[in-house]
Image (tube, rainbow, N blue to C red):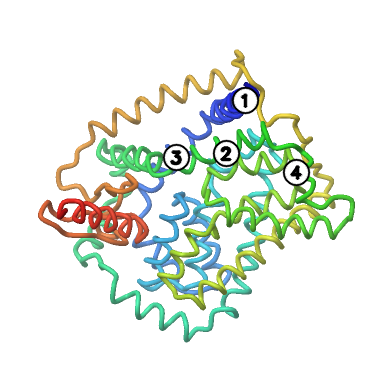
Amino acid sequence: MHILDGLWHGLDEAFFMVWETLWALVLGFVLSGAVQAFVSRTEMRSALGDHGAAALARSSFFGVVSSSCSYASAALAKTLFARGADFTAALVFMVASTNLVVELGIVLWLLIGWQFALAEFVGGAIMIALLGLVMPRVIPRSWSDAIRERLADTEDHASDATEAAERSEPLGRRLRSRRGWGDAAGYTISDLTMLRTELAIGFVVAGFLAALVPTSFWQSLFLTGHGFWSSLENVVLGPFLAIISFVCSVGNVPLAAALWQGGSSFGGVVSFVFADLITLPLLSIYRKYYGTAVTMRILIAFWATMSVAGLAVEYLFRAVDIHAPTRPRMVVHDGFQLNYTMVLNVLALIGFAVVYRLYRHRDMSGSRFAKDPECGMQVEIAHAPASRSGEAGTVYFCSDHCAASYDAHAAATTTRGSR
């Protein structure tokens, strides 16, 4: 009976984490879908030609407005790099598209405090500046040129006619068209479909961690009472926990809330949130894209800059007298209450119903989009990172990760059919 009570308590905690952040998730996904539908990939790539301060600022901006899951952002960064973007600028784009986004900031604010939402953007800027200094020195130009040449041979380049059409269509016309907003709704629904597993795992695991893991366990992991050395140990340990957690994008915020409740330092939580780009599955993807040597350097550079950014934010906030939020006894309060959360959630659900209707009734004739059969993401055909052709036609993927999964499923089906 004690085990059943524990399971119920964990699921209950997870459900009310979702309830507390529901309106923020809907708002974030809708905004992200709109931006992805109306921002040109061609213009984005042409703006990332070097790793100077201006180019990194543009990389950050385009990353912010191209919010996506870690897998899709890694694939898009690879494509941008293969088609001419600077390697450092492409990595900065990837960092910004997963960590400097509206939905992440709002969910951080709601679950553990506005201080962490602010730290996301301040720390992100610090991390990007550090990457701009470190990556060109860690990855020699000769290496990146060789990788680009290899990747360029595998890229399915868009035709000149397609790219010219993309550039010539006025933004104002797109914003006023039902088809444009149908495309935005498609991105919204597909992004939500793509991230549903990460979100579910993140909330459920965080619920059980918050409800069942005693504070003494976290205190045994995170040093306290040793001043700077405790802070340093925490910011180094945070990314390690992210690496082995397998949870990326917004899904790792509930886990960050559990770590904060359990005793991690402020900087340790910040470095954990940033480290969604170095989980084990993503490291495997980088290895396929760039090779083992480059992947190891990316891991070390990311881990170091994430830890330094977390540590810098912690001490910077202390210097300007921004106090960390109080550690809660529980991440969220159980039970429904008639408050602003209830009102915003109801409005969000109504808005989501409108978006879903747009998605179901959008005009797909001559569409430049396809649906990734593995994760459900809406993919721009001209810029799809991978595709496969078969008897039923061509299918397109958001990343090589999904293409490999599709190949594995197809091989398994063929093996079963031959028995």
- Identify which residue, 17 or 201, lies in the foreground: 201
Point out the frontmost of discs 3 and 1: 1
Query: Counting residues from the N terminus, which is met first, the one under dot 2 or under dot 3?
Result: 3
Left or right side of 300 for 294: left
Q: Residues within 10 Å of mark 1 (few under 14, many from 20)?
A: some
Between the C-alphas of marks 2 and 4, the distance is 16 Å
Q: Marks 3/4: CA distance?
A: 39 Å
- Which residue matches tag 4? 217
From the image, state whether disc 3 or disc 4 is nearer to you: 4
Check if mark 2's residue and mark 1's residue have beta carbons within 8 Å. Answer: no
Q: Is residue 167 above or below residue 37?
A: below
- Say whether disc 2 or disc 4 marks the residue closer to the N-terminus: 2
User: Which residue does the numbered mark 3 point to in the structure image?
Assistant: 31
Task: Count the marks.
Answer: 4
The residue that label 1 is drawn on is 9
- Label 4, label 1: how far apart the Cα atoms are: 19 Å
Query: Along the polypeptide, which appears first: circle 4 or circle 1?
Result: 1
The kind of residue on which mark 2 rests is Val
Identify the amino acid type marked 1.
Answer: His
Q: What residue is drawn where x is 23% and y is 54%?
A: 410
Residue that mark 2 sits on: 205
In percent of width and height, residue 140 lies at 53, 83
Name the secondary structure under disc 4: helix
Q: Helix, strand, or loop for circle 3?
A: helix
Residue under the point 21% across and 56% down: 415
Residue ranking furthest to the top: 338
Query: What's under tag 3, amino acid-wise?
Result: Leu
Give the CA separation, mark 3 to mark 1: 33 Å
Could you tell which of marks 3 and 1 lies nearer the N-terminus? 1
